[in-house]
Amino acid sequence: MLVKRKSGVGRWVKVVLAVALPLALFSGAIYAAFYSGFFRVRDIEVRGADISAADILAGREFANILLPFPAIDVAEFPEILSFTVNKDYWNRKVVIEVKGREPTMIWCLEQSNRCFWTDPEGFIFSDAPQPSGSGVVRTVEDISGRDLGVGNYALSQDEFTNLLSGLNVLDGLRVPVSGVRIDNVRFEEFTVVTADGPKIYFSLLFNPEEDYDALKSLVQSDGWKGLCYVDLRTELRVYTSKVCR
């Protein structure tokens, strides 16, 4: 009977240890991870833009490096294209890599007398200074009466791509540009005023690169400066006139 009692006690001890030991280890791990300072974040560094971690967190806390970093609302930072969060667990440090939007063009609105920076997609992300003189920054004068601001697109992506392509064609031909204008966005066209030649009418509906050779012949001709305008608003067609309407 004594041997059996010891055997029963031994089995009970084994059961208690089998349950209590993993529970103790689990509780210790939970405490170490979330209640001790072992995984407490030491530093949050932001690289690539002049914004702080406090701006990104917007009042939220991030104290434990094991936890997911709070979601970043990119819409709150129109000048930023993307955020990438990297964790250095060994040093308990968070590094946020910021990619800003590329300033591509200044878009000026006649109605509000304001100018904005756009990125290569036509997204308006910040205010821009009023251009003065013949600077190297491409500038569009929008007199269509629209009310645009930060967070809007100046044009649809396809239209903006075609606008840039038209200006790239002129750059390739070394045609000096003194102005780019959109009179009425519903007409889906834009006008380029050259510095020493005719006005050029482009369509926003198609890429004008296929007109490069025809336009090159005109630019290199003796009659280039005698033209009033060149009309490229019909696909694969080039019309010219010496008479201004």
Image (cartoon, rainbow, N blue to C red):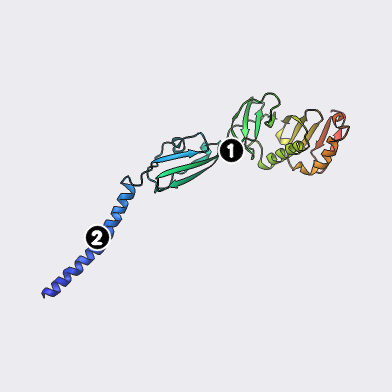
Query: Sequence order check: which comes first, mark 2 or mark 1?
Result: 2
Category of crowding for the residue at label 2, using alpha-carbon neighbours closer than 10 angstroms: few (below 14), some (14–19), many (at least 20): few
> From this viewpoint, which residue is outermost toward the front?
91
Q: Position of residue 171 (x, y in %)?
A: 75, 36
Q: Position of residue 108 (x, y in %)?
A: 66, 28
Inspect this view and state whether residue 182 appears: no
Relative to 36, is 222 above or below? above
Q: Position of residue 200 (x, y in %)?
A: 79, 33
Category of crowding for the residue at label 1, using alpha-carbon neighbours closer than 10 angstroms: few (below 14), some (14–19), many (at least 20): many
**SS assignment at label 1:** loop
The residue under label 2 is: 20
Q: Identify the residue at horizontal 20%, vertical 69% (top origin).
A: 11
Picture quarter with the C terminus:
top right
Callouts 2 and 1 close, C-beta under 8 Å:
no
Q: Amino acid at mark 2?
A: Ala
> From this viewpoint, which residue is outermost toward the left?
2
> From this viewpoint, which residue is outermost toward the bottom?
1
**SS assignment at label 2:** helix
The residue under label 1 is: 101
Marks 2/1: CA–CA distance: 56 Å
Q: Position of residue 161 (x, y in %)?
A: 69, 41
